[in-house]
Image (cartoon, grey):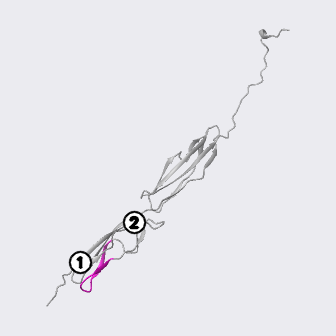
Amino acid sequence: MTVNDTEIPTITCPANVVVSNDPGQCAAIVTYSVSFNDNCAGANLAQTAGLASGSSFPWAHLNSFTVTDGSGNTAACSFTVTVNDTEIPTITCPANVVVSNDPGQCAAIATYSVSFNDNCAGATLAQAAGLASGSSFPSGTASNSFTVTDGAGNTATCSFTVNVNDTEIPTITCPANVVVSNDPANARRS
């Protein structure tokens, strides 16, 4: 008598996994385990989608598994691994800039650079206040501020001032010595 195994194996995936990125990385190492059981020996587990346990996961992945027993009975399960970028980008403004006015101007051309970095590609830099590098800054103090925003919406800011000192000596022109005779009506009587 032949006995057919019609009992479906069991498989258990973990709950959905949500983690923060590993420091300095745009991904995270994630470990998990999938368990299965069958009434007969010889069942095999196969991963049909996603990354293996212990892999570096970027962003979100669906992991799917199927267990098949010796009689061809199958069961499947799946879960997602989501990696959230929680790392704040870095931004560096220069020290406050102090310059003298350009000759004959009540302003000065000032240049500077702002640098930024993020663990994931795609961060953008925006100037929130002030004038662009290479602009003519008026005499006095101007505040410049910048914000870097990464793809996950994390932000960092920095600011500095550009102070243009008017160091140009003013010029004055006096007329030549003036020699005049007195007016006759203003002659002095003795």
Compare residues 126 and 102 and report the one nearer the observer. 126
Instruction: Quadrant for residue 17, please give it.
Output: bottom left
Q: Position of residue 34 (x, y in %)?
A: 33, 77
Q: In the picture shown, does residue 127 fall above or below 123? A: above
Amino acid type at circle 1 is Thr
Which residue: 50% across, 49% down?
127
Disc assigned to residue 37:
none
Q: Is residue 122 left or right of residue 99?
A: left
Looking at the rendering, the stretch of residues picked out in magenta corresponds to 34-49
Q: Which residue type carries mark 2?
A: Val
Of the residues under marks 1 and 2, which one precedes in the sequence? 1
91 horizontally vs 83: left or right: right
Neighbour class for label 2 at 10 Å: few (<14), some, many (≥20)? many
Residue beneath disc 1 = 74
Residue 172 drawn at (x, y percent): 71, 31
Task: Identify the residue under disc 2.
Answer: 83
Is 50 one of the magenta-colored residues?
Answer: no
* Residue displayed at 44% across by 62% down: 86
Q: What is the x, y in percent for residue 52?
A: 36, 74
The answer to whether residue 41 is magenta is: yes
Indicate whether 18 appears above or below 36. Answer: above
User: As drawn, which residue projects farthest toward the front?
Assistant: 15
- Say left or right for 157 vs 171: left
Furthest toward the left, the residue is 1
